[in-house]
Image: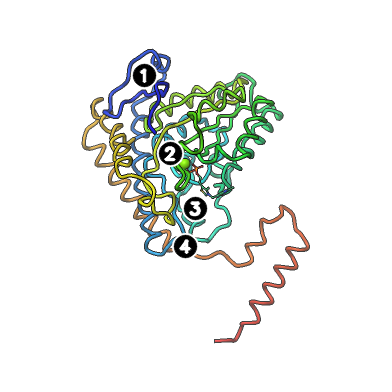
Amino acid sequence: MSYTAETLQLLSPEGRLVQNEATERYRGVVESIGEERLRDFHRTMSVVRRFDIEAGNLQRQGQLALWIPSLGQEAAQVGSGYAARPQDHLFPAYREHAVGYIRGLDPVKIIAMLRGLSHGGWVPEETGNFHLYTLVIGSQTLHATGYAMGLALDGESGTGDLERDAAVMVYFGDGATSQGDVNEAFVFAQSYRTPQVFFLQNNHWAISVPVSVQSRTPLFHRPAGFGIPSIQIDGNDVLASYAVTLENLDAARSGGGPRFIEALTYRMGAHTTSDDPTKYRLDADVEYWRQRDPISRFETYLRSLGEGDAFFDEVHQQAEDLAADARRRTLALEPPPADSMFAHVYSEPHPVMDAQRAWLANYEASFEGES
Ligand SMILES: Cc1ncc(C[n+]2csc(CCOP(=O)(O)OP(=O)(O)O)c2C)c(N)n1
Ligand SMILES: [Mg+2]
């Protein structure tokens, strides 16, 4: 259930840079990451973890229908999220709260959806091209591949200008790799050589089904059968996630065709708040991954570079403030007008929607005057 001999790791669980033949290739990228960006990695992992815990608490207090925790997967998301360029389009599953945060998504928009107050969340153009959450497992890989085909056809990719050429990155889980949609996306991506990175977060579980049942071989071996270059990284290592994603997104945007990254990580919490993982997994496994926590190893690394308590205290306070703000704004959320459910079914006015809107108005009016 753990790392293979081929897993790329740039930062060890003890917080030290790994130096060997495989890491040599990424040395230049790691050395070029500025101090401020390194601090961003830590800050974002920490504040999103705190937000995630607060959202889980809100669900337990009856304020949300459901919450989908991302605890433990912060490095995979934060490294890859910062590696994307502004013009890139990111297609999440439903657990990528940190990626959305990096792209400018107000996390309360995720909460509003899970409080039953919005039909899907946000406008990608206003949230750094962070597309909508997709609950139909794996379907976002096809959306992403189609979008990447469109970018190529429109000449928005593959011109040789890294600052302008766009790429697509799609996030999905280990369980999703068993879906037909995902495999069809691989076929189309390779046939059309789309500018795209498939980013698999292997958190070892698809609800209660272990990844060992989904595949008898490491998942990053599968893309070879489709002709897609792939690599497996330590998904709890934010430096590996950043450096490898940067390299692969730039290769894809430059006309190199699709790429596949498997980030080995672990879902420390429940699948969702509807799940009880104590029914199907061992405490010893959870403990094994706790010792490989993405945030504490990065904190050790930053301290070894000279970062002091003042910075970590400030991040702690920022995380507390974000959580308190999210709670306050969640409790102040208002339900949308009932007829807004008809607004986005079609992009243009539609007679059936008009009829249904009128029916609803009439029905609501029939209660007027009743106490
Ligand atoms: C098409 C489809 N089948 C089944 C489900 C029910 N379901 C929701 S999450 C999930 C497991 C997904 O596991 P994985 O892809 O590993 O992602 P993770 O939740 O671990 O991030 C399943 C089977 C669904 N939402 N959509
Ligand atoms: Mg999974």
Give the amino acid type for the residue marked by disc 3 in the picture. Lys
Taking the image as shown, residue 235 lies to the left or right of residue 252, namely left
Mark 1 and mark 2 lie on one chain; the one further toward the N terminus is 1
At a point 38% along the width and 31% down the height, the residue shown is: 2
> Residue placed at 63% from the left, 76% from the top?
364
Which kind of residue does numbered mark 2 sit on?
His
- Residue of label 3: 109
Depth check: 134 or 328 in front?
Answer: 134
Q: Secondary structure at mark 4?
A: loop
Callout 2 environment at 10 Å: few (<14), some (14 to 19), or many (20+)? many
Q: Quadrant of the N terminus?
A: top left
Disc 2 under 8 Å from ligand 2? The reply is yes
Residue wearing tag 2: 204
- N-terminal-most mark, 4 or 1: 1
Q: What residue does disc 4 label?
A: 333
Q: For marks 3 and 2, give the CA distance.
A: 28 Å
95 lies left or right of 142: left
Give the alpha-carbon distance from disc 2 to disc 4, as whole Å.
Answer: 35 Å
Mark 4 in CB contact with mark 1 (< 8 angstroms): no
Q: How is the image coloured?
A: rainbow
Q: Which residue is mark 1?
A: 31
**CB under 8 Å between discs 1 and 3:** no
Which numbered disc flags the more N-terminal residue, 2 or 4? 2
Give the amino acid type for the residue marked by disc 1 in the picture: Glu
